[in-house]
Amino acid sequence: MRTKELTIAALFAGIMAVLAQVAIPLPFSPVPITGQILGLFLTGALLGRRLGTLAVLLYLILGAIGLPVFARGGAGIARLLGPTGGYLWGFLIGVYLLGWVVDKGNKFTFLRAAGGMLLCLVVVYILGALQLAYLMHLPWQKALLLGVVPFLPLDMVKLLLASVLSVKLRRILKQAGLLSFPH
């Protein structure tokens, strides 16, 4: 792996950390509304499976070792193992699948980006709701009401925004020689 690729992965981990600080707590849920999902979508769509997964892994490692990169300045292993940690673990699997979708096929399109992001979001929601339900001793339906349903409308807006942005940004980054894409 080249220095340029590592630097770009670190930059995207930083972008996710900054977007995580855009956090709105919900009084009825331990899960805040954040900008992390937007960063996750852009990371997977722009970097693909390999670099996107590396960027998210770096983000999780930085948080695990104590840097305040998680929502509302959170950090530490306790965040990964706590009620909202499933969402963070979901980021890793979700970005891999998103990257896999965008790396496949002949052409990167809005629909390919949106489809990959939707798959990513479903994984994040499932793992997040599972850990939330388990650690808070909630029935599955209650975990969905607290940890998924309130986020769906805004996350769909983020998905659409990230899909549009990623198509444009991918073309710009390729022309600038900052990233090389298979398609």
Image (cartoon, rainbow, N blue to C red):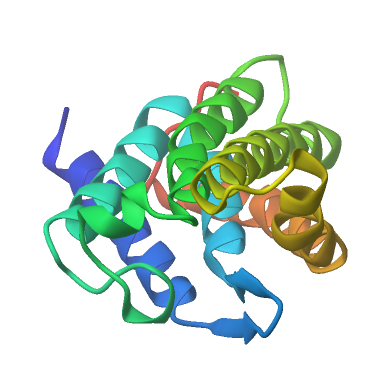
Q: Residue at x 15, y 33 (%)?
A: 2
Q: Is residue 142 left or right of residue 33?
A: right
Q: Quadrant of the C terminus?
A: top right
Residue 108 percent coordinates (x, y): 71, 32
Query: Furthest-front residue in view?
Result: 137
Q: Nearer the viewer, residue 171 or 2?
A: 2
Q: Residue at x 64, y 45 (%)?
A: 129
Indicate whether 16 appears above or below 49: below
Residue 122 in view in this figure: yes
Q: Is residue 2 left or right of residue 37?
A: left
Residue 97 percent coordinates (x, y): 58, 25
Residue 106 percent coordinates (x, y): 71, 16
Q: Nearer the viewer, residue 170 or 162?
A: 162
Indicate whether 80 appears above or below 97: below
Residue 166 percent coordinates (x, y): 65, 52
Q: Residue at x 72, y 37 (%)?
A: 122
Indicate whether 181 appears above or below 11: above
Q: Is residue 101 left or right of residue 177?
A: right
Q: Is residue 143 left or right of residue 9?
A: right
Q: Nearer the viewer, residue 39 or 123?
A: 123
The image shows a total of numbered marks equal to 0
Residue 8 in view in this figure: no
Q: Quadrant of the N terminus?
A: top left
Q: Residue at x 25, y 40 (%)?
A: 5
